[in-house]
Image (cartoon, rainbow, N blue to C red):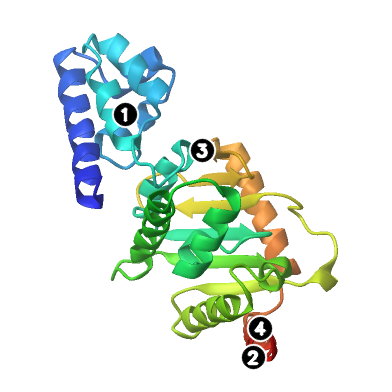
Amino acid sequence: MANGSRQAVWEFFGAELKRRREDAGLTQVELGVRVFVSGAYIGQFEQAIRKPQLDIAQRIDDALQTDGIFERLCRKLINDRRYADYFAEVVGLERLATRICEFAPTVMPGLLQSAAYARAVTLAANPFVTDEYVEETVSGRLERQAVLKDATRPEYWVILHETVLRVPVGGRAAMGRQLDHVAGLMRERTAWVTVVPFAAGAHALMAGDLRLMDFDDAPPVAYTETSFTGTLVDDPAVVKRAQRTYDLLRVAALSPEASLDLIESAAEDYRQCARTT
């Protein structure tokens, strides 16, 4: 499903939810009580700020007696093979965020990946899939990067562990180009990237990716991901803990200038190795 059609379905979901709720004579708070979310959450669905999960859509259908319309719309929104089900909502929220902060301990974040890097990590995790699947996945990842090219793009802060720089994903030549790409985004001030070096030792988040997203008219959220699943969290207390963790990681990282030097040095090392092999 193309970006525009996904957004149109999302907006239709919100408008239809508002219409059906008002027809039932319910406030956002009253509907929220019936489906076990807050009234503010219902408001975010109606404004197309947040895409509801399938189980919430099903509970809305039950509460409003809408014959499964919201479940069907939700399935249409998440039926995109390019993104894992647990990540689909994050993709939508990226386009609404005013600031995105990421920590990546082992793999380059998708918003920074080159096509060659994205293809290599996709194949490494799915060695028996078709070429069509690989190209769909890669195109979806590159499509997401348009958010960094918009005039209203979010502030994008990234902390990489040095491990990300040292694993030659896709081969040495491809990895050199990947790091050149990151350095270019840093020099263009599209992304603010720092690196936690090996010398820093233990750090605040020893496993898993962390992402924080801020919005103009919605509460911040945190997203954590491991190899097989991801979790989107909006509980204020948990998000606050995640923000503190990110602050600790920031303290452990090199300065932006030293990080750029390290990234460019690693890229040159890959180029030299590629020339000699």
Which residue lies under the disc numbered 1? 75
The alpha-carbon separation of the residues under discs 3 and 2 comes to 48 Å
Q: Is residue 30 visible?
A: no
Q: Which label belongs to residue 270? A: 4
- Which residue is tagged 3? 234
Q: Nearer the viewer, residue 179 or 277?
A: 277
Count the marks. Answer: 4
Expressed as whole percent of the image width and height from the top left, the position of residue 121 reads 56, 58
> What's the CA distance linking mark 2 and mark 1?
49 Å
Q: Earlier in the sequence, mark 3 or mark 1?
A: 1
The residue identified by callout 2 is: 275
The quarter in which the C terminus is drawn is bottom right
Mark 3 or 2: in front is: 2
Residue type at the position of mark 3? Asp
Q: Residue at x 59, y 75 (%)?
A: 175
Mark 1 lies on a secondary structure that is: helix
**Which one is nearer the viewer's eye here, 18 or 268?**
268
Instruction: Pick whichever, 120 or 254, lies toward us.
Output: 120
Q: Which mark is residue 84?
A: none
Q: Nearer the viewer, mark 4 or mark 3?
A: 4
Asked whether residue 1 is in view, the answer is: yes
